[in-house]
Image (tube, helix red, strand yellow):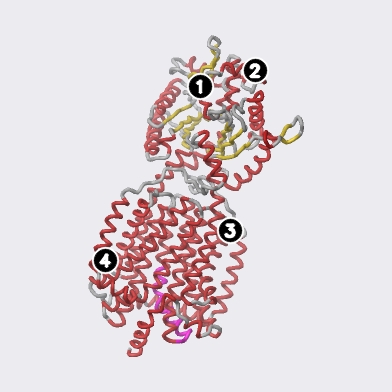
């Protein structure tokens, strides 16, 4: 089969180049349409109960996590000049297209009782800028008399104040959000220039905007770094610009196609899919190295260019195919996580890897068939003295120190397994950012002053229409009792719900006296209700806390970025306590009957994210196991021998265990970004195993001697595998430059794992094969694999040629 493929490629060079060029032009046109995603990354599958609850919550109350916060200390704020500027800033931001509402101490609302109309009026507290300092002092006193705003817009204990900017949901999840955030920052910076001091930005719209921009910036940076690093290494190896230029041409075409796939599949660029282009360069270049090394090796034997290119395709085609299949499997298993963002990453990455392989198999032989024959200078890398010494040392260790190899591996495994038990699965919303990053610093500012800005929602279903106000406001008193429980957790901010609207109304009913900011008794509640009958005509910001039937209500809390483990503990602690508030009748000391029970759900954007983290860690671990199983089946096709599966898998599996041990010792947590290491690294590490075993099988079938086959395999594959290991180590190492901690850890861990894996493939794998010298039957070793049936002819020719020489 591979003989026919080689002939087809070399006989139809122009036609193949034309087709590749046409498809690449089409893919380039598609790639220009690629866009970043601006939506919150939903990590949970559609069928997950948490996801279902959250979608239902949004249907009832709208999007949460749509508030951007601007915070600062109040120093000098209540001086007329600075307050006037804050007042103007609040109104200027409100006038930006895409902003729904702005609330600050300079733009507040209060309730006023209108006895003549028998209703409450929701009016601005400040209708115009204060004209004198005395007016401003009066305003400050009136703000202090509104307990509702304390610890929401200002904190009297810490002296912090905040401006809460609510986005229109139509603008929240598209590109226009970036322009809105830029405009807000520009206006705030002008205020800051006039009144210097620390200004802090946070909230999910801001965090997501900054991260989207970082993704775009880093994608370009990694592409540039990948090109530079691989170019330098290729130039050092081959000592010629031609292999560098055309190897990069191959992977750049693959990168263009990957962007085309993203658009054609109707996906957008995410934090994960943004890694695919530089990954393709790092993974695709070794394909070119293996092909060119084989081309140069063959040419050094007989100095026949056409024959060398043909043999290159015949001999390397199958091993490279299997190697790229294992790499594609390493990515493809993410399609089984039931998470959309990982499904997209896995599908596009696996397709791109296979396409890049196909492009390299066609472009490299075609391009080099038009180029001059390699000179002796270009073949020197095959005879490097340093490389020969390294390979000689490897052969010596493999032949004479196998007991030392096995002892070292056993000790490393024992230590690594002990470290594995120290690994924790833990993720934070912004844990991928360094502690000195402004986004992280600002988030901590809001946590210190307002206990956090991440949405944490509690949805209450009263099970009947108008149930929130029925039975003399029973649900309201239960929510008020829930406030006391929530107040015991420092991780949560002050809750807000329809109960606060009632307390606000009670204060207004008693002419603004702050001591009446409390939930009234049943009789007073009825009287207050008479003043709220025309609430629909008022600009009532509390409408977002009730559905149209008044059956459902919500309690909104802001949460600190406490991590997935603490969120799990917090929800587990809260659920029974919430249930005891809503479904336990203290008077009768009995639980409510099923028909009378309230249904209370803990949800929200941050709960979704952090629960999604736990879900993914579990599913990605299963994906690693799936990758091991599928790749084992692929490896089995080489020898069709069950005994050989262990020999094939262990050299790639042991490095993963060592890496997991290091993660435990160095407290690198399991999370979506770091768990990617194992399946990706296993898929790529298996490439080396396949390449080594493919060549070993060919040599054994020619020489019928395990020791000789191992020696010849190390001698021929060693150079390419060492080149590949260096390319991969430095290639993945570029991700250490990322501002995202998870991406940096991913790069470092994969680099380390692959270096260990290629050492394992060059030392442990041949040691296993030599150990089997007396245990492996000739029948097992000679049994043909399905992929190699048509290679006998060229193997016999090679053997005859070697005897002549």
Q: Earlier in the sequence, mark 4 or mark 2?
A: 4
Q: Is residue 152 magenta?
A: no
Residue 790 lies left or right of residue 393; in this view the side is left
**Front disc: 2 or 3:** 2
In what element is the residue under mark 4?
helix
**Front disc: 1 or 2:** 1
- Distance from Cα at disc 4 to Cα at disc 3: 50 Å
**Front disc: 1 or 3:** 1
Q: Which residue corresponds to mark 4?
A: 16
Which residue is at 53% across, 83% downward? 776
Q: Residues within 10 Å of mark 4 (few under 14, many from 20)?
A: some
Residue 524, which numbered label? 2
- Distance from Cα at disc 4 to Cα at disc 1: 69 Å
- Please tell me which residue lies in front, 602 or 229: 602
Residue 536, which numbered label? 1
In what element is the residue under mark 2?
helix
Contact check, label 4 and label 2, Cβ < 8 Å: no
Image quadrant in which the C terminus is located: bottom left
What percent of the width, then of the height, locates residue 121? 51, 17
Q: Which residue corresponds to mark 3?
A: 664
Contact check, label 1 and label 2, Cβ < 8 Å: no
- Distance from Cα at disc 1 to Cα at disc 2: 21 Å
Corner quadrant of residue 728: bottom left
Residue 488, which numbered label? none
Contact check, label 1 and label 3, Cβ < 8 Å: no
Main SS type for the magenta part?
A: helix
Which residue is at 30% across, 68% downward? 362
Q: Residues within 10 Å of mark 2 (few under 14, many from 20)?
A: few
């Amino acid at each position: 089969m591979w003989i026919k493929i080689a002939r087809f490629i070399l006989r139809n060079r122009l036609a193949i180049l034309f087709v590749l060029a046409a498809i690449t032009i089409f893919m380039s046109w598609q790639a220009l349409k690629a866009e970043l995603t601006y939506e919150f990354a939903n990590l949970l599958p559609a069928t997950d109960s948490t996801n279902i609850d959250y979608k239902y919550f949004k249907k009832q109350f709208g999007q949460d996590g749509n508030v951007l916060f601007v915070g600062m200390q109040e120093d000098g704020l209540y001086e007329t000049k600075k307050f006037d500027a804050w007042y103007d800033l609040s109104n200027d931001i409100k006038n930006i297209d895409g902003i729904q509402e702005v609330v600050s101490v300079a733009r507040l609302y209060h309730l006023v009782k209108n006895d003549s109309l028998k209703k409450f009026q929701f009016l601005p507290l400040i209708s115009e800028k204060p004209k004198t300092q005395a007016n401003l002092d009066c305003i400050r006193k009136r703000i202090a008399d509104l307990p509702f705003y304390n610890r929401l817009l200002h904190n009297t204990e810490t002296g912090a104040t905040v401006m809460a900017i609510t986005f229109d949901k139509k603008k929240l999840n598209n590109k226009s959000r970036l322009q809105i955030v830029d405009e807000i920052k520009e206006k705030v910076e002008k205020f800051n220039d006039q009144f210097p001091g620390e200004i802090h930005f946070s909230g999910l719209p801001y965090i997501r905007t900054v991260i989207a921009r970082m993704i775009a910036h880093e994608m370009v940076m990694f592409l540039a770094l990948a090109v530079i690093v691989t170019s330098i290494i290729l130039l050092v190896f081959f000592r010629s610009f031609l292999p560098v230029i055309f190897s990069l041409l191959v992977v750049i075409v693959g990168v263009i196609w990957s962007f085309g796939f993203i658009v054609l599949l109707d996906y957008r660029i995410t934090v994960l899919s943004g890694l695919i282009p530089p990954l393709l360069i790092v993974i695709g270049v070794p394909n070119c190295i293996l092909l060119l090394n084989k081309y140069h090796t063959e040419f050094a034997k007989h100095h026949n260019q056409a024959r060398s290119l043909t043999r290159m395709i015949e001999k390397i085609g199958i091993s490279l195919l299997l190697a790229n299949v294992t790499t594609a499997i390493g990515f493809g298993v993410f399609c089984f996580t039931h998470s959309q963002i990982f499904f997209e990453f896995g599908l596009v990455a696996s397709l791109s890897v296979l396409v890049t392989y196909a492009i390299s198999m066609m472009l490299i032989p075609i391009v080099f068939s038009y180029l001059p024959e390699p000179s002796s200078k270009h073949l020197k890398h095959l005879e490097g003295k340093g490389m020969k010494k390294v390979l000689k040392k490897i052969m010596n260790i493999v032949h004479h120190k196998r007991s030392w190899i096995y002892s070292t591996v056993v000790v490393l495994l024992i230590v690594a397994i002990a470290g594995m038990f120290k690994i924790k699965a833990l993720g934070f919303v912004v844990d991928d950012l360094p502690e000195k990053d402004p986004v992280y610093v600002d988030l901590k500012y809001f946590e210190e002053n307002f206990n956090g800005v991440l949405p944490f929602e509690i949805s209450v279903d009263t099970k009947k229409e108008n149930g929130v106000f029925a039975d003399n406001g029973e649900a309201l008193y239960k929510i008020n009792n829930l406030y006391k429980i929530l107040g015991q957790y420092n991780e949560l901010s002050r809750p807000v719900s329809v109960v606060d609207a009632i307390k606000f109304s009670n204060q207004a009913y008693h002419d603004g006296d702050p001591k009446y900011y409390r939930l009234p008794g049943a009789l007073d509640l009825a009287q207050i209700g008479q003043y709220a009958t025309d609430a629909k005509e008022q600009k009532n910001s509390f409408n977002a806390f009730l559905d149209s039937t008044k059956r459902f209500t919500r309690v909104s809390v802001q949460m600190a970025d406490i991590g997935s483990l603490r969120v799990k503990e917090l929800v587990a602690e809260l659920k029974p306590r919430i249930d005891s508030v809503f479904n336990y009748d203290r008077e009768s000391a009995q639980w409510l009957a099923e028909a009378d029970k309230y249904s209370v759900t803990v949800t929200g954007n941050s709960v979704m994210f952090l629960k999604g983290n736990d879900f993914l860690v579990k599913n990605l671990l299963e994906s690693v196991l799936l990758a091991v199983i599928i790749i084992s089946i692929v490896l089995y096709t080489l020898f069709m021998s069950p005994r050989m599966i262990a020999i094939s898998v262990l050299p790639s599996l042991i490095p993963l265990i060592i890496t997991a041990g290091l993660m435990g010792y160095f407290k690198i947590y399991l999370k979506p970004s770091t768990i990617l290491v194992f399946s990706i690294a296993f898929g790529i590490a298996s490439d080396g195993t396949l390449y080594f075993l493919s060549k070993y099988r060919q040599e054994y079938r020619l020489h019928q001697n395990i020791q000789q086959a191992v020696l010849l395999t190390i001698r021929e594959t060693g150079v390419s595998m060492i080149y590949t290991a260096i390319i991969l180590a430095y290639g993945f190492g570029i991700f250490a430059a990322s501002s995202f901690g998870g991406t940096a850890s991913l790069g470092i861990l994969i680099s380390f794992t692959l270096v260990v894996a290629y050492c394992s493939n060059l030392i442990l794998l041949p040691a296993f094969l030599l150990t089997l010298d007396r245990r492996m039957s000739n029948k097992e070793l000679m049994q043909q694999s399905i992929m190699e049936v048509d290679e006998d002819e060229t193997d016999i020719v090679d053997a005859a040629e070697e005897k002549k020489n």
